[in-house]
Amino acid sequence: MRFRELISRTCQRIVANAAGSYRIFKNRKGRILKSFSPVQPIYYPQNLAALVLIGTGLCMIFLDEPSHYWRETLPVGFLHTFGWLNALGNSSWLLLGSGVLCLVLLAQNTRKFGLRLRMALYSTFIYSAFLFYTVAVSGLLVIAIKWPLGRARPKLFDTMGAFHFDPLIFKAAYSSFPSGHATTVGATIVTLALIFPSWRGFIFATGFWVAISRVIWGAHYPSDAFTGVLLGATFSYYSARVLARRHIGFKLSAGGRLHRSLGVSSARQCRHVVGNMLKKPKNGQAPASSSVRDAVVQSTTPLRSRN
């Protein structure tokens, strides 16, 4: 009976917190007109569309067919290594991980926590939900594009060639363009680069090899991967702008650049509070998070977000 009551209360708390989060998002709509910030010219939709047309066309002309023959010259062990990287582009583990984390955070009674700990949990929920949304929706978007187009995969190269399209056939062997894994990579690297700006170089380098692993593995052509990455990255960028104009998770500078709203100093403080909360008490002492929580509750100094 107690277990059922616990499950019932947890579900009610999840629903209530989710409804509260939606109300916050909806109520922030009034801030949009007050926080207008222009899009940088490089991110104009027409410029991105031009980049897709030029980049995809060049890949199809110069890379798609040669990549098939080049891949056949690679050692078997090399292919196995990139097969492991290829698994990182699967959206399932990203959706499962971020989804479960969101549910765990929604199930928390944050009223009993201190200010900084609440800020840490709130920020973690915002960014986890954003990752889940960008990966899920961009994945559905690429499915709606690739299946009707019907481009033959590289495994059909010997019979169909590199440029065979069979629209509306709706078969897995004819769903090569654009790459769903590469779309997930594009959405993920932009999301992580916005959340962890100091790690952007490493994030982009890792994303490059994960995306190219689809080509080396023989599941896609270079043009499929290029278009998929750009599609996912563009979707995440504009989704972050929607939140930034509502001052949720991100912010826009006067020049239109996107930034994480949580400043470096505040992020460091939140990480310290969470670390103390996770520490186990020693020798019968109270957990460090309790003292930190009490200190934060008593403090009336607001936290400032700095870049």
Image (cartoon, helix red, strand yellow):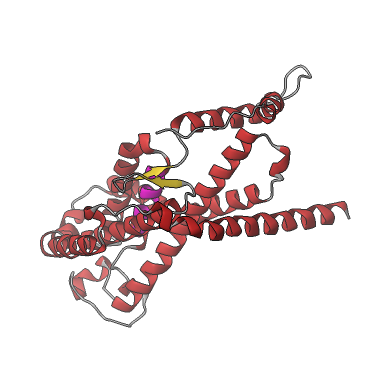
Q: Position of residue 215 (x, y in %)?
A: 26, 56
Task: Tell me if I can see residue 90 in this picture.
Answer: no
Along the viewing direction, whichever of 134 and 167 lies nearer the viewer: 134
Q: Residue 6 placed where, x, y %?
A: 80, 52
Frontmost residue, 67 versus 150: 150
Residue 279, above or below 37: above
Residue at the farthest bottom position: 168
Q: Is residue 184 magenta?
A: yes
User: What is the magenta segment's predominant secondary structure?
Assistant: helix
Residue at the front extreme, as displayed: 34
Q: Nearer the viewer, residue 179 or 171?
A: 179
Does the magenta portion include 171? no
Q: Quadrant of the N terminus?
A: bottom right
Does the rendering let one see residue 232? yes
Q: Residue furthest right?
A: 1
Q: What residue is drawn where x is 36% and y is 77%?
A: 171
Residue in the foreground of this view, choosing between 63 and 116: 116
Where on the picture, by quarter, is residue 78? top left
Who's the residue at 75% across and 23% down the image? 286
Is 171 situated left or right of 109 in this image? left
Q: Residue at x 17, y 57 (%)?
A: 67
| Magenta-colored span | 183-194
Rendered location of residue 277, percent (x, y): 65, 30
Judged left or right of residue 192, residue 167 is: left
